[in-house]
Structures are given as structure tokens and as C-alpha cells.
Image: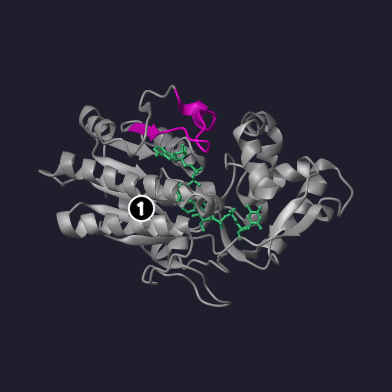
Amino acid sequence: MHSNKNILITGAAGFIGSHVLRLMVLKYPNSNFVNLDLLTYAGNLENIKDVESAANYTFIKGDICDAVLVKSIFEEHQIDGVIHLAAESHVDRSIEDPLAFIQTNVLGTVNLLNAAKQAWQNNYEGKLFYHVSTDEVYGSLGKTGLFTETTSYDPRSPYSSSKASSDHFVRAYGNTYGLPFVISNCSNNYGPNQFPEKLIPLFINNIVEEKALPVYGDGQYTRDWLYVIDHAIAIDAIFHNGSEGETYNIGGLNEWTNIDLIHLLCELMDEKLGREKGSSSRLISYVKDRPGHDKRYAIDASKLCDELKWQPTVDFKEGLSKTIDWYLDNSEWLEHLTSGAYKEYYQKQYG
Ligand code: NAD
Ligand code: DAU
């Protein structure tokens, strides 16, 4: 059992990080949480405004690649635990600009590892570096099989290559310098606060605005979807009770082809918006495929379930319904995002 007191969470203004931060700040009032986030296009303090005045929370706007800043945070806040989520996270963007992914995901992670190593080198007792990663490092599955913790790495996009590289560096620091670490590799998340460049929030937004739903290729690609709060609960369990030096796969046990998911989303949206049945699915438009598109991801999470007694708690239809309700009830959140930079990205990506 780890009981770290001063925890640095990186990227906690983003989608998953915001849920992890909220859970931790409220559940562990005797620990202090420092959120280091650059507030890139994907970072949004509105995601965490309900915890911003908590006594055990500090926000620092800054770059994980900034060695001087990161070193000073470790010293000033006596950091004894790290939960590292900050990353460039969108596959399509990585295809346009791989270097940005190497900069943040690889160099940023190594910079954090260096700072932890330097700050902790005389005493690794009670310290932990938790690196949050993705199932995409394992590559693409055929029709059958699941990714386990021992599946060979086979990253196929610039995003997944950068995440795989960062995973390797974390293990290398454990092996070479004895840095205590744990890694988790999770499947696709969905839920409130996800930036509307990812499939589910993008399509919710487009349905509301009666815009085309751009399905890549034939829509027969498969993803394993997990409600974001179940991911946050798993991260809490692994951070506090996971074994050092181990990797845990996290997944929803919930595979959907994109097109089946989109039809379910369309049905739910028709009901919620009081529109005629079938009106949202008429917006479906097959577009050019994502280059190098991974066919199927699916996770075997039995190690996490058996060792740490974790299970997904939110059924997919219920989670999707809650997610849609959140986006419909928080149109201001979306409006703040969908001005300016987002419009530019959208125009470039979808024409
Ligand atoms: P996100 O894009 O929503 O948020 C990323 C956050 O990191 C943002 O707040 C951003 O401002 C911050 N950030 C980016 N570059 C930074 C830098 N240089 N310095 C400091 N902060 C920076 O991402 P997400 O979807 O919440 O993913 C979080 C982590 O979980 C990532 O490491 C991602 O690889 C991993 N992951 C995501 C999923 C998913 O489905 N979204 C699944 C598995 C793993
Ligand atoms: O598997 C975990 C990964 O899941 C995370 O590591 C990534 O950070 C996260 O972005 C996600 O990656 P995907 O590429 O699977 O997610 P995305 O939402 O971009 O796409 C999901 C599927 O939907 C994928 O097969 C591509 C397809 N798609 C996506 C978009 C944005 C479309 O058909 N049309 C679209 O416009």
C-alpha cells in the first residue's frame, strides 16, 4: 500500500486527468495534489473548477518539458508521488505533426523521470512514479485475441510510438536507476470533459448542429470503450495498491465497431433531442480512412480485476446516455472550446 503525501499530477486539466484529480482531492484530504498542466488546446480549467479552491490542491501552469520548473516543483512541494497523464493524445494530430508528440510524450516524460530521480535518489522508500499509458502501444489485433500485459509492443502511429517510447523510458529508469514505477495501459475512454476532436464528443456535437458524421473508412474498426470514471477508479487502485515495477492493463470488456456505436449514439440522440427516429443516422457520411488506422483494440484486464478487485461499474448504454446528457447540459463548455482554434482544426481535418 502506497500512502504518498505530496502528489504531482500532470495534465489534470485534461479529460482523464480532471476526473483523476477530482477523485483524489476529495478522497484523500490529508494528501496534497499539485497539478502541472500547460493548458494546451486540450487543457481546460473549467474541467476542475469544482475543486480549484480545495485546501489540498495547487495548480501550476507549465510545461512538463521545462526542467528548471519541474525540478523546483519537486523541491518546493516535497513531491513523493507522480501520476503522469500530460500528453498529446489525439492520433489524427500525431499524423499531421509527429514532432509535437515526441516533444511532450517522450522528452516531457524523460524530463519528469530525471526530476524524480534527482529529487529521490537518496531515498526511494515510499516514492512512486505512475505512468499512464495506452493500449495502442500493443498495435492492432485481428478478429480475435486480447492485449495482455505481456503482448509485444507494436505501435503503428506517431502517437502510439511516442507513448510506447515513454513506457520504455519509464521501465528503463526502473531497471537502470531503481526508480519505483508502475504503468497502466488503458483502452478508449469516454465521458464528460472529453475534447470534441475524439469520436464520441465530436459526433454528439455534430448531431446537435446537424452536421455530417465523418466515419473513417468502412466503419468496421473496433474499440474497447471504458467510462472515464472507471479509469480514474482504476488509477487510484493501482497508484495506492499496485505492485512496483508492474504493468496493469485497463479495459472496458466492451468492444464496439465504430459503426454500431455510432448507430447507438444516433438512436439515443434522436430520443433526447425529440427528433424523428433515424434523423441522426442520416448524417452518417463515410470519408477517407485515417492513414495506418488500427483495426481492433481489446484489453484483457484480468490482472487488474484479480489482483486489485477492480471492475468497470458503468454499463456502456448508461454511460453513453450520461455522456450525452452532460454535453447537452454543458453547451457553454463546448461553445468556449469550439471557437477559434477548434474551428481551424476542424476545417483542416474534415474540410
Ligand atoms: P487530453 O488531451 O484530454 O489532456 C492532456 C492534458 O495534458 C491537457 O490538460 C494538456 O493541457 C496537458 N498537456 C499537454 N502537453 C503538456 C505539456 N507539455 N506540459 C504540461 N501539460 C501538458 O488527454 P486525455 O485523453 O485526458 O489522456 C490523458 C493520458 O491518458 C494521456 O497520457 C493519454 O495517452 C492516456 N490515455 C488516454 C486514453 C483516452 O481514451 N483518452 C486512453 C488511454 C490512455
Ligand atoms: O485506445 C486508447 C486511445 O483511444 C487513447 O490512447 C487515445 O488518446 C484516444 O484518442 C483514443 O484513440 P482512438 O484513435 O481510438 O480514438 P478516436 O476517438 O480518435 O477514434 C475512435 C475511432 O473512431 C477510431 O477507429 C477512428 C474513428 N473515427 C474517429 C474520428 C475522430 C472516425 O471514424 N471518425 C472521426 O472523425
Residue 189 placement (x, y as % from top left): 54, 52
Which portion, as a residue range, is magenta? 33-52
- Coloring scheme used: one colour
Residue 47 part of the magenta segment: yes
Query: Image quarter for residue 193?
Result: top right
Which of 296/322 is in front?
296
Query: Image quarter for residue 328?
Result: top right
Residue 41 part of the magenta segment: yes
- Is residue 119 something one can see in this rendering? yes
- Going by the numbered disc 1, the residue's amino acid type is Ile
Q: Residue furthest right?
A: 276
Answer few, some or many: residues within 10 Å of disc 1's Cα (few below 14, many 20 plus, some between 14 and 19).
many
In the displayed structure image, the side of residue 138 where residue 106 appears, left or right: left
- Is residue 310 something one can see in this rendering? no
Residue 310 placement (x, y as % from top left): 44, 57
In the displayed structure image, the side of residue 22 where residue 207 appears, left or right: right
Name the residue beneath numbered marker 1. Answer: 238
Which of 297/102 is in front?
102
Q: Residue at x 61, y 45 (%)?
A: 197
Residue 344 placement (x, y as % from top left): 63, 38
Secondary structure category for the residue under label 1: helix
